[in-house]
Image (tube, rainbow, N blue to C red):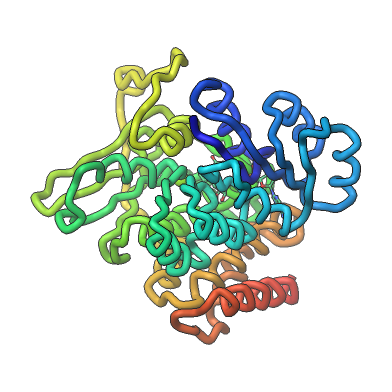
Amino acid sequence: MKHISLLGATGSIGTQTLDVIKQYPNQFVLEAMSVGGNIDLALQQIKTFSPRLVSVKSKEDCDKLRLSVPSTTKVVYGEEGLLEVATYGHANILVNAVIGSIGLAPTIAAIREGKTIAIANKETLVTAGHIVTNEAKMNQVSLLPVDSEHSAIYQCLNGENHKEVDRLILTASGGSFRDRSRAELKGVTVVEALNHPNWSMGAKITIDSATMMNKGLEVIEAHWLFDIPYERIDVVLHKESIIHSMVEFIDRSVIAQLGTPDMRVPIQYALTYPSRLERSVEERLHLWEIGCLHFSKLDFDRYRCMAFAYEAGRLGGTMPTVLNAANEEAVAAFLAHRITFLEIEQLIEQAMERHELISFPSLDVIIEVDSETRRFIHSRI
Ligand code: NDP
Ligand code: MG
């Protein structure tokens, strides 16, 4: 039996994690969960899963929820609440599906408590990859990827020798605007940007896919998870999202992982690793139905966020923190109709240009640079 703490239960990954937990009641039990402000959904989830600990974002929601849940469910709130859920004593695995670098402190706290980490929250690895991976090593804790590309690479690397890996090849769908030129990106709307062709995801990551920042964050995520230098991480456009990613070995053999685009598959793999559980769903991959798979080279002028991410990754230190914080704030501003789509990348570029890099930053420095970058972006909007 795996005892699970889940951060971000009401989100896209969170609800799909609960789908997996529900499907295998003899394998998984939900011990603790956190949500943001979606209290109605949280209430339904508490009824179905009876977690012993729940955290919400605000004190008001905490007070409200306490009146509606059984006395066996403790309700807490805020960033302290996230820490309490992440380190909950009865859980042995943390699924981190919260959005943004707010997931960093709970991840580190859970690692220090020896919990296995199933990580969807890529912003945490981008903003402080060296600290998170080092803590995991020191505490002998596994970091299991939930992101489909990284789950694919993890599976391709099963039983392989790290020294024989030549290249990681991440696939990218191209997002909502993949068929538009740069000139055609002027004036695109939030609704258009949220219309992803292959995946149904939360709003922030859907915009990140449209700007291609999502793939940029994933390159940095892959660098930390698999300890591969940036010059050996490639991205190829693959609009069908059937090949989730590939690994090329030194003998030029390439192993790919395939499947229909369904996040429950990598979520389940992270929860059952190193075993697999049979899925009862009918849907499976029939390549004859798809017919053709397409691939094309990534154009760094078209997708400028990709160039920023590689640059931030190669520079290292605090630059990925700046990239991530600037992106989080710019995307939030775009979703709130306060800036245009192309202004997202302009703001990120400005934040990176003015930043004076600090190498090997401590956690305190990262937190400070993150806040400072957010203040800068706010001042420009
Ligand atoms: P969603 O926006 O759908 O969900 C985010 C979750 O975090 C919700 O439960 C939300 O609560 C909660 N939350 C947001 N802000 C706060 C806060 N300040 N305090 C506490 N809780 C908060 O995101 P996704 O599920 O799409 O993504 C989650 C992570 O997984 C991201 O890092 C993303 O990059 C990654 N990922 C997502 C994929 C996907 O298919 N969606 C694929 C691969 C990776 P509420 O809604 O109650 O306010
Ligand atoms: Mg992904």
Quadrant in the picture for residue 45: top right
Q: Nearer the viewer, residue 128 or 289?
A: 128
Q: Residue at x 12, y 49 (%)?
A: 252
Q: Position of residue 284 (x, y in %)?
A: 39, 19
Q: Is residue 195 left or right of residue 236?
A: right
The answer, for residue 145, to whether it is visible in the render is yes
Q: Residue at x 57, y 31 (%)?
A: 16
Q: How many marks?
A: 0
Q: Is residue 138 above or below residue 316?
A: above
Q: Nearer the viewer, residue 265 or 230?
A: 265
Q: Is residue 297 left or right of residue 8?
A: left
Q: Nearer the viewer, residue 117 or 41?
A: 117
Q: Position of residue 139 (x, y in %)?
A: 42, 60
Q: Is residue 380 left or right of residue 202?
A: right
Q: Is residue 66 left or right of residue 222?
A: right
Q: Residue at x 91, y 36 (%)?
A: 67
The answer, for residue 176, to whether it is visible in the render is no
Q: Is residue 26 above or below residue 140?
A: above
**Image quadrant containing the C terminus:** bottom right
Q: Position of residue 313 (x, y in %)?
A: 41, 69
